[in-house]
Amino acid sequence: MADIKEEILKISIARMQQVGIRSVSIDDICHELGISKKTFYVYFPSKDELLVEILAKHQEKVSYELAQSLSKRTVEQSLIEWAKIAKHAEKQMIKTPPMIYDLEKYYPQLFKQHKAYMRSATEEILMKFLQNGINEGVFRKEIDIKIVAMVFLDIQYRLMEFVSKGEKPREEILRIGHQGMDILVRGILTEDGLLRLREKVKNNI
């Protein structure tokens, strides 16, 4: 029984990420899995209930992956890895994923709740990351980790708004993102941390 529920979630997530929430019907999901709508309703009374559980699983997955990525690396290693990812991610920019676009447009309350949860969870993990950086001598001990985490997230969410609303061209969004992150990172790094990272990033990217 649990396997059927997991398969419904798996197929629904894959389809919604590809074409958006509105374009995926319960009939589509049932047809792909070879189950009846009656079976679907045993696990999810409605498409809205399905979406709520999808978001809950996404929140759990992202929180876990973020925590795991930080627990397996030093702060210095994480910064180098993120710099690599950011460089390649720019090539994929800039388009709002269909599922997020539909969530914001057609399910504003769910979108608001999801965004608030993700921000809170990410802020908590960022604060731990910043404290680890202070302990490792990469970040300055005088910084207020809560304020820095808030500023980092404000920059990221503002960039996401530019993307979703099409307010600025791609090159301008990238320029703003680079400038904001450069100011933030330089402001929190120790002199030794800046020198170490500058050399390692240059050699690893």
Image (tube, rainbow, N blue to C red):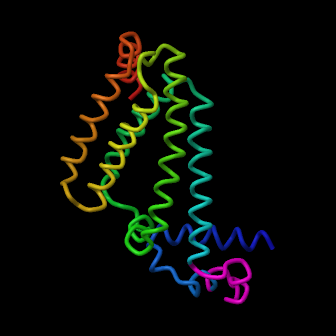
Q: Residue at x 61, y 82 (%)?
A: 46
Q: x and y percent of residue 147 in the render?
A: 40, 32
Q: Is residue 124 above or below residue 49?
A: above
- Residue toward you, 83 or 204: 83
Count all numbered tags in the image, as a single digit: 0
Q: Residue at x 61, y 52 (%)?
A: 61
* Quadrant of the rendered image containing residue 179: top left
- Residue toward you, 6 or 107: 107
Q: Is residue 114 magenta?
A: no
* Quadrant of the rendered image containing residue 59: bottom right
Q: Is residue 158 above or below residue 44?
A: above
Q: As drawn, is 136 to the left or to the right of 86?
A: right
- Residue toward you, 153 or 9: 153
* Quadrant of the rendered image containing residue 50: bottom right
Quadrant holding the N terminus: bottom right
Q: Which residues are magenta?
A: 31-47
Q: As drawn, is 112 to the left or to the right of 48?
A: left
Q: x and y percent of residue 176 in the render?
A: 23, 41
- Residue toward you, 58 or 82: 58
Quadrant holding the C terminus: top left
Q: x and y percent of residue 42 in the render?
A: 74, 82
Q: Residue at x 37, y 42 (%)?
A: 88
Q: Residue at x 74, y 74 (%)?
A: 4
The residue positioned farthest toward the right in the image shown? 1
Q: x and y percent of residue 23 in the render?
A: 45, 80
